[in-house]
Amino acid sequence: MDVFWSRGYHGTSLPDLLKATRLSRGSLYAAFGDKHALFLRALDRYIAEALARLDTELDVRGAALPGIRACLAGYVERTSGAKGRRGCLLVATTMELTAHDSEVAQRIRKFFKAMQARLAAAFARANAAGELADGVEPADAARLLICLAEGLRVVGKTGSEQAASQAVIDTFIARFAA
């Protein structure tokens, strides 16, 4: 996963994968089939980890708005400084492959759908608890949050500062919180 994340799909060579996995060519092909299949496994792992992290941040057992804030704080952390410059495997893959790879596009669409459902549920809980401003539609707020968070990932590649990302997040929360 780290090799694909660092070099991109097309920039990753078989020797890169052999070195990273410490497998022989035959063992790599026996275990994964081919480079594309290995990449899909790596992408699936990245997506599973991202959704697990989101579930932890949103913690359905707690109050919704603090969970949304925790989610946003995580994005600020992941999009600032060196972490931000590294970028996001999902965003990089979206830009590199989705136009030409239907399997990748399907996985990424499924990820964003799952992310939106989790965020919409959190916004609905916040709305029910009176934590959202009047007229905020949970599904719309969730979609906007996804666009904002993924935009922070892209801007983070330029080395944006944490304070700038935090200001964006604070503006978002101020618009939606009661």
Image: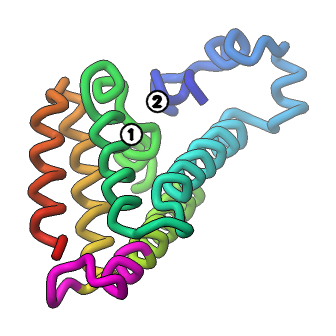
User: Residue, x 46% and y 30% (percent of image)?
Assistant: 8
Q: x, y percentage for residue 112?
A: 44, 64
Height in image: 124 above or below 73? below
Height in image: 92 above or below 108? above
Q: x, y percentage for residue 19?
A: 69, 9
- Where the C terminus falls, by quadrant? bottom left
Residue hosting label 2: 8
Height in image: 65 above or below 30? below
Element under label 1? Answer: helix
Residue hosting label 1: 92
User: Residue, x 35% and y 46% (percent of image)?
Assistant: 95
Q: Is residue 150 left or right of residue 32?
A: left
| Mark with earlier residue (2, 1) | 2
Cα gap from disc 2 to disc 1, whole angstroms: 7 Å
Q: Which residues are magenta?
A: 122-136
Would you call the spot at circle 2 few (<14 residues within 10 Å), some (14-19), or many (20 or more)? Answer: some
Element under label 2? Answer: loop
Residue 10 visible within the image: no
Residue nearest the observer in this picture, 86 or 80: 80
Mark 2 in CB contact with mark 1 (< 8 angstroms) = yes
